[in-house]
């Protein structure tokens, strides 16, 4: 099977899909995020020496994993993305077992993540790679904005920060690659959030009549 040729078709198809489905409310879960996940997954695939078939499964899942955001509500987007991958790959004549593996990689990203093998572990870590990078703050702001736009409700900065702290505290990278290269950065991001939250609490204590942000 010509995996590289099919992957080019996958990339082209998903690129056209995102281009046709532009949604200004999706400031985080967009084509830029998808390309980042593909890049990180590819990097990790090389690190683990995955063969061509395994790399195909992982990379295809990375391209499709967030397409479901553009076909319905955020809840259940993983299943819709997996279904879209199945539809496309079936038309390409991909065998059933490979399609199932692609779908399982996508479904492994459902929170809380519960990957069952290395490919799914890589998929999970590639999806949340930014947790351990210096780009985390900027990405978190985009996510905050996206949720506000999707819900139509303003979310207090402190409330969002508390939720993000809980998210980072409950998360752990699934691969040893992520644990070695990203865990330290994630802890720094978490400490930065906690310091900011503490400063906010101290400021509020000095201004008891201050309105919420």
Image (cartoon, rainbow, N blue to C red):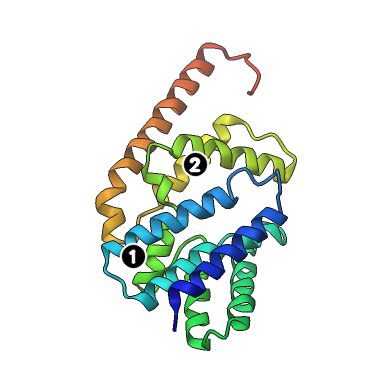
CA gap between label 2 and label 1 equals 28 Å
Residue drawn where x is 71% and y is 62% of the image: 71
Residue drawn where x is 45% and y is 40% of the image: 165
Task: Name the foreground residue: 76 vs 48.
Answer: 48
Taking the image as shown, residue 154 lies to the left or right of residue 204, namely right
Q: Secondary structure at mark 2?
A: helix
Answer whether residue 127 is visible to the viewer in this image. Answer: no
Where is 18 relative to 159, above or below?
A: below
The C terminus, quarter of image: top right
Where is 23 relative to 141, above or below?
A: below
Answer whether residue 131 is visible to the viewer in this image. Answer: yes
Q: Which mark is residue 164?
A: 2
Residue drawn where x is 65% and y is 35% of the image: 155
Q: Which mark is residue 172?
A: none
Taking the image as shown, residue 200 lies to the left or right of residue 76, namely left
Q: Secondary structure at mark 1?
A: helix
Residue 49: name its quadrant: bottom left
Residue 43: name its quadrant: bottom left
The N terminus, quarter of image: bottom left
Task: Report the label total.
Answer: 2
Where is 73 relative to 133, above or below?
A: below
Residue drawn where x is 39% and y is 27% of the image: 195
Q: Position of residue 143 (x, y in %)?
A: 57, 42
Q: Which mark is residue 45?
A: 1
Mark 2 and mark 1 residues within 8 Å of each other at the beta carbon = no
In primary-sequence order, the first of circles 2 and 1 is 1
Q: Nearer the viewer, mark 2 or mark 1?
A: 1
Task: Name the foreground residue: 151 vs 91.
Answer: 91
Q: Position of residue 15 (x, y in %)?
A: 60, 58
Where is 50 relative to 127, above or below?
A: below
């Amino acid at each position: 099977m010509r995996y590289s040729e099919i992957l080019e078709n996958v990339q082209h198809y998903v690129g056209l899909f995102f281009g046709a489905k532009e949604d200004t409310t999706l400031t985080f879960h967009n084509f830029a995020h998808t390309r980042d996940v593909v890049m990180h997954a590819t990097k990790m695939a090389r690190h683990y020496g995955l063969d061509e078939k395994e790399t195909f499964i992982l990379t295809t899942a990375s391209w499709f994993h967030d397409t479901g955001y553009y076909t319905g509500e955020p809840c259940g987007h993983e299943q819709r993305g997996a279904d879209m991958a199945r539809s496309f790959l079936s038309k390409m004549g991909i065998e059933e077992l490979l399609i199932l593996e692609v779908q399982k990689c996508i479904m492994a990203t459902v929170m809380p993540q519960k990957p069952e093998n290395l490919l799914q572990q890589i998929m999970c870590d590639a999806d949340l790679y930014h947790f351990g990078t210096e780009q985390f703050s900027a990405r978190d702001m985009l996510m905050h904005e996206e949720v506000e736009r999707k819900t139509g409700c303003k979310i207090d900065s402190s409330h969002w920060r508390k939720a993000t702290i809980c998210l980072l505290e409950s998360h752990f990278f699934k691969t040893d690659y992520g644990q070695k290269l990203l865990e330290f950065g994630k802890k720094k991001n978490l400490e930065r959030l906690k310091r900011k939250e503490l400063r906010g609490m101290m400021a509020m204590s000095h201004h008891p009549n201050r309105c919420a942000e």
